[in-house]
Image (cartoon, coloured by chain):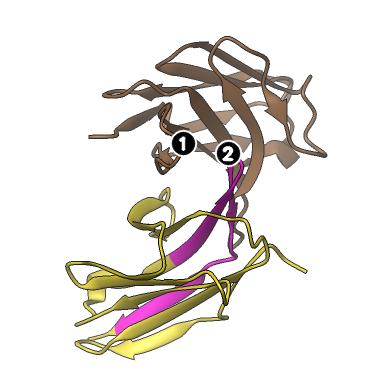
Amino acid sequence: QKEVEQNSGPLSVPEGAIASLNCTYSDRGSQSFFWYRQYSGKSPELIMSIYSNGDKEDGRFTAQLNKASQYVSLLIRDSQPSDSATYLCAVRGDYKLSFGAGTTVTVRA
Amino acid sequence: GAVVSQHPSWVICKSGTSVKIECRSLDFQATTMFWYRQFPKQSLMLMATSNEGSKATYEQGVEKDKFLINHASLTLSTLTVTSAHPEDSSFYICSASSRDGDQPQHFGDGTRLSIL
């Protein structure tokens, strides 16, 4: 079983719609969760970090964490073509990050 | 804040050459730096973790004698790919985090290494 699993893509959404990305993790003791955005040929860029259950909003991005279900999600509201990228879910156990395989999002103009 | 600089961004060299990649934290002290490798259309693979002043911890399957890591200061870590071969061609990315346990990792821009 993979440590961090993300919903398979690619995910195609029209401009202005909501993109919903899901991630589950296997280590129940994990305490820190991150979403990174990676454009093709570039390195990952931190979008959100979340540490406690519930929602965390930052601009058009909302991260949701449910530790009981071992589930973390990312919502992108009012999707823009510039949001087209691969989104990586990362979970920290000890000091290392475990990454999901990523979900590629394409926003259609 | 939390800027990580990685240099060079792009290297092409002949087989057998050794290549050094630098990773610097510009505006914070990085007690821990991480080195990743990413092949096309795959996720990041952690190669090793380096802590300032101590030996790096390598992930299973990563040859420590081939990938030499030095973390001599709180702002600089280097990765040297020794005697590089075409199969070492990849995108190498470093990241750094500060002393605070919950702080996220911040990534450098990556180094694209091509071995001919």
Residue type highlighted by circle 2:
Tyr
Left or right relative to B96: residue A17: left
Residue drawn at 58 percent across, 71 percent down: A70
In the figure, what tint was chain A given?
Answer: yellow
Question: As displayed, is residue A8 above or below residue B32?
Answer: below
Residue A73 seen in this snapshot:
yes
Start and end of the magenta stretch?
A: A87-107
Residue A20 falls left or right of residue B3: right
Was residue A94 drawn as part of the magenta stretch in this picture?
A: yes
- Residue A30 in percent (x, y) is at 58, 55
Q: Contact, CB < 8 Å: mark 1 with mark 2?
A: yes
At a point 65% along the width and 26% down the height, the residue shown is: B14
Query: What amino acid does circle 1 point to?
Result: Gly
Q: Which residue is denoted by mark 1 in the rendering?
A: B101
Q: Colour of chain B?
A: brown
**In the rendered view, would you say A81 is above or below B52?**
below
Q: CA distance from mark 1 to mark 2?
A: 8 Å
Q: In the image, B20: left or right of A19?
A: right
Report whether A31 appears left or right of A94.
left
- Asked if residue B47 lies in the magenta stretch, the reply is no
Residue holding disc 2: A95
| Percent coordinates x, y for residue A57 in the rendering | 24, 68
**Image x and y of residue B78, in percent:** 54, 19
Q: Indicate the position of residue B61 as horizontal and vertical percent values.
A: 82, 39
Out of A95 and B83, give the one closest to the viewer. A95
Residue at image position (68%, 15%) is: B55
Q: Is residue B116 something one can see in this rendering?
A: no
Rendered-image quadrant of the C terminus of chain A? bottom left
